Amino acid sequence: MVRVTVNDKTVEVPPGTSVMDAIFHAGYDVPLFCAEKYLSPVGACRMCLVRTGAPRKGPDGQFILENGAPKIFWMPKLQAACITAVSEGMVIDTLSDEVRHAQSGMVELTLFNHPLDCPTCDKGGACELQDRSYEYGLAEKFYHPNRLELPLYTRFEMTRRHVDKHHSLSPFIVLDRERCIHCKRCVRYFEEVPGEEVLDFIERGVHTFISSEEVGLPSGYSGNIVDICPVGALLDQTARFRARNWEYDTTETTSMDDASGAGILVDARSGRLERIRAAERREVNEIWISDAARFGHQWVNENRLLTPLVRRGGRLEEATWEEALAAIRAGLEGVPREEVGLYLGRESTLEEGLAAVELAHLLGTPHRDFQGRTLYPATAFAPASFEELLEAEFVLVLGDPAEEAAAVHLRLSEYSRGLKPAPRLNHGTPFADLNIKERMPRLTHKLALFSPYPSATAKWAYAWGVHAPGEEQALLAALLGQGEAPQGLAGAVAWVREQLATKKSLLVLGAHVLNHPAAAQMARTLAEQRGMKVLAMTPAPNARGLEALGLYPASGGAAWTEPGPKVAYYGYLPTEAQLRSARFRILHLSHRHPLAERYADVVLPSPTFYEKRGHTVNLEGRVLPLEPAAIQNGQADGAVAALALLAEALGVRTPVRLVRQATRLLQEKHRLPPAMERWLPKAAGWAARGEAAGGALFLRPTLWRREQLLGAVAQAVEVRLEVGPATARAQGLAEGYRVELELPWGPEAYEVRVVEGLPEGVLYLPALGPWAGRRLEARVLVGGGV
């Protein structure tokens, strides 16, 4: 530890700690704009200027003394606290007039070119520049030569700069260059977190501005720059001018967009969801979330189902919950209990899963499942934590984290950067080496990746390759030394086997492996042989939790993708074939849909996951809380209430009728730990049934979901049928052609995109939901050019 003195207080901090962190540790404050604890320091804003001094050693190796104590040699100029490292005996002054005058001067210089937009700026009330101006701005007044004019808090009289105020960087983000204070947080974010250097400073001096390449911002993880911008220079276009910050009802909950379990802040106003921001969850997502989690919320407010619907005279009509109960009771009359199917949606909580399992046991039905369940259970693998990922010597990825689990992708970026900046700065001098901190080299030798299509995560891997969907079994056999590798991957596989044999490794599995039971069993064998823990990127965000409760088909039961029971409760919109095969259909939906209008007998209003209370389990096995946001949803209620209604209609008394009852039963019966702790049960009695489906159409994972394709998302996200050049020639397709596909949920039309590097003979379509990682037979009808 290093002993330093901050003003009048002595503290001990680890070597390499910045002066700024030492000041905070001592209980004092220092102003900042450019510093961000999850990014490397750069010293761009100069707001954190402090006075520093340190003792020196003489020729004899002993400290030079003054009055019996080590003499402090003060630096001739003030130092930026964020890029200065502490040294033994350092003295730091943050309270002197010299320091305060310099800090107020920086506020003055920053405000000089800043527009007076506070009354209309979306950042108002949460602006760091407002706070720093109030706390550290000039206290004295300056007067014009003409005494009749009002006093000003600046010494400058020239006109401020005028630049572009509404520069759209993407459909999601707008840049106001007049408000930009050049802190460089956004530039560093793209460089260090997603690893995409798309923003930078252009020009010099007062003419400096932030800009991107002509292609704009990539729509994957760009929205985080809105959160970290200290002023209103970067704004969320989907929430612009919707409300002032103090008018929002803010709720912290968990994102169910993927299995990462990222923390989010849901901002609602007047009962409408207006904005999503990242919540700090250091163990999981730090402060970063995907664009799908941030911007894909506009669907929540549109076309909501607010009351139950009951079919009368061939039409669905609005009804009460009591009338829905009567309709369900009439529809189930004479139906054997074991023929009732219970199917939950992909965003179901642990409490809802427990309600379904308990009711299924009482009914004796084998027909129970949840949307997005993979053919092989994720609970068959010992889960790794993100901390264990960062500590691994080698990571093997079989999948595409960039499109399957946002936190895994960003953690792999952090993993490939190696050590955090502070340990690298442990060199005993009080100055940080900026060359060490900026543009830290990627440690690609620690990562290998194989996927059925090119993955953005592969840029950090030393060995990577693309194989055709269905060849994952051959790939894993080669990794086990039991066969030959797929074409073109022999060299990469041989290198990976060497790494696995000598290093402490970790395995990341994608949905395409979990939906191929034979390949998944080989992956389990490989993990057990090498002692590897696994991060299984499931299409359903709570797959580990629902599997652990036993929510999967028993012997003779129908899976969530299959037509099955004659009477079924669906917590999602099933395929048309499933709806046609059932005699009585109860749908539990948050939004209206034409298929429900055509086939459903009873439709119950459901909350979205933003409005649910309960718990979920992420891919680490970590229990995470969900809290309901202040969103108006009419008479909507969750699956716990809907299943209790179904039980009442069947004359069954279920032990789970309220969410609180379900939570208590989870704690007593399943030993569910408190939120943020890990829960690691296995799914007992699971036997993977059947083989992976064949077919030329591969449903490629993507973080976006079908219901999110509204407004700005529809502009930014291209949903096309992707084929390789050879496949396009063989199928008679060309760039821009319109084709129609026969899919399980109905026919759909897409535009063709020809992509280099895709395996031959395969059509790729973004899954946009729980079917990710599956192969299907699809009939292609060519419609012609555009």
Image (cartoon, rainbow, N blue to C red):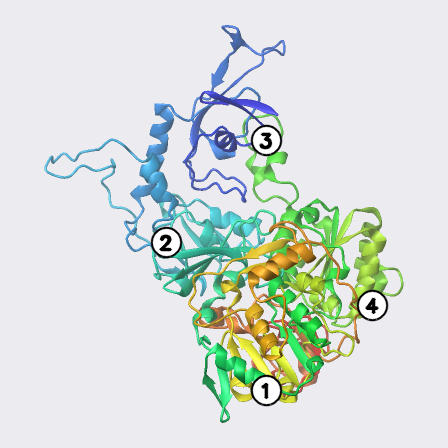
How far separated are the C-alphas under marks 4 and 2? 54 Å
Q: Is residue 356 above or below residue 697?
A: above
How packed mark 1 is, by other alpha carbons closer than 10 Å (few <14, some 14-19, many 20 or more), is: some
Determine the CA span between mark 3 and mark 4.
48 Å
Number of numbered markers? 4
Asked if labels 1 and 3 touch by Cβ distance under 8 angstroms, the answer is no
Q: Is residue 781 visible?
A: yes
Q: Amino acid at mark 2?
A: Asn
Which numbered circle lies on residue 16? 3
SS at badge 2: helix
Q: CA distance from mark 2 to mark 3?
A: 37 Å
Q: Nearer the viewer, mark 2 or mark 1?
A: 1
Q: Is residue 748 visible?
A: no
Q: Find disc 1 in the rendering and name its residue.
A: 331
Identify the residue under disc 2: 245
Can you give x and y, in whole percent of width and height, for residue 272 in the image? 40, 66
**Residue 474 bears which disc, if any?**
4
Residue 500: % across, % down = 81, 51
| Three-letter code for the amino acid on which mark 4 is drawn | Ala
Residue 770's x, y, as percent? 63, 71
